[in-house]
Amino acid sequence: MNKAPASVWQNPIHFFAFGLGSGASPWAPGTVGTLAAVPLYFIMAGLSLPFYILVLVVTFVIGCWLCERTSEDLGVHDHSGIVWDEFVGYWLTMLALPVSWQWALAGFVVFRFFDIIKPWPIRWADRRVAGGFGIMLDDVLAAVYAGGCLHLAKFFIDSL
């Protein structure tokens, strides 16, 4: 069971790193964090593609710093409650896909699948790349796998 530090509710950096508090969930904080990213995705989905990509880049860069700082403050590399990486990973998964609850659900399931099983090179990056960049990188790689699968599915659906 996950025990979130009290600083999540006192330190704005920790609050964001813990996915607006969603990572404080005592059960499956990564899944709860990804779920918390879904409503924000629906807000972002109205952006033009270039602005959506800009938001992804900015939230990734900020996420590297948030995750690094929070890990250092807590003395734990990639505390299970740090879920900002899940937010950005989910949003990247959904890049340029149709906006609907069905695609959002598919993105949630496929992203969580790859984030949990961590096929190569995700597991390698998770174990070998340190700091905030390392925390963010494995979720970005999981998002590339998940987004690729969903775009492939969309291609086949569109060709029917």
Image: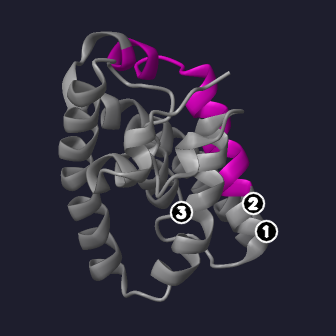
Q: Quadrant of residue 52?
A: bottom left
Task: Name the one closer to the observer, 6 or 2.
Answer: 6
Marks 1/2: CA–CA distance:
5 Å
What residue lies at 53% left-to-right and 48% top-to-bottom? Answer: 148
Label 1 environment density (alpha carbons within 10 Å; few <14, some 14–19, many ≥20): few
Label 2 environment density (alpha carbons within 10 Å; few <14, some 14–19, many ≥20): few
Question: What segment carries the magenta color?
Answer: 106-126
Residue 86 in view, yes or no? yes
The residue singled out by tag 2 in the image is: 105
The residue singled out by tag 1 in the image is: 102
The residue singled out by tag 3 in the image is: 94
* CB atoms of marks 1 and 2 within 8 Å: yes
SS at mark 2? helix
Task: Name the one closer to the observer, 107 or 88.
Answer: 88
Please tell me whether residue 152 is drawn above or below residue 30 in the rendered image.
below
The image position of residue 97, as x and y in percent, is 57, 70
The image position of residue 70, as x and y in percent, is 27, 36
Q: Amino acid at mark 2?
A: Leu
Q: Amino acid at mark 3?
A: Met
The image position of residue 37, as x and y in percent, is 55, 61
What residue lies at 28% left-to-right and 38% top-to-bottom? Answer: 67
Mark 3 vs mark 1: which is more N-terminal? 3
SS at mark 3? loop
Q: Amino acid at mark 1?
A: Gln
Marks 2/3: CA–CA distance:
10 Å
Please tell me whether residue 151 is drawn above or below residue 159 in the rendered image.
above
SS at mark 1? helix
Task: Name the image quarter holding the C terminus.
Answer: bottom right
Residue 159 in view, yes or no? no
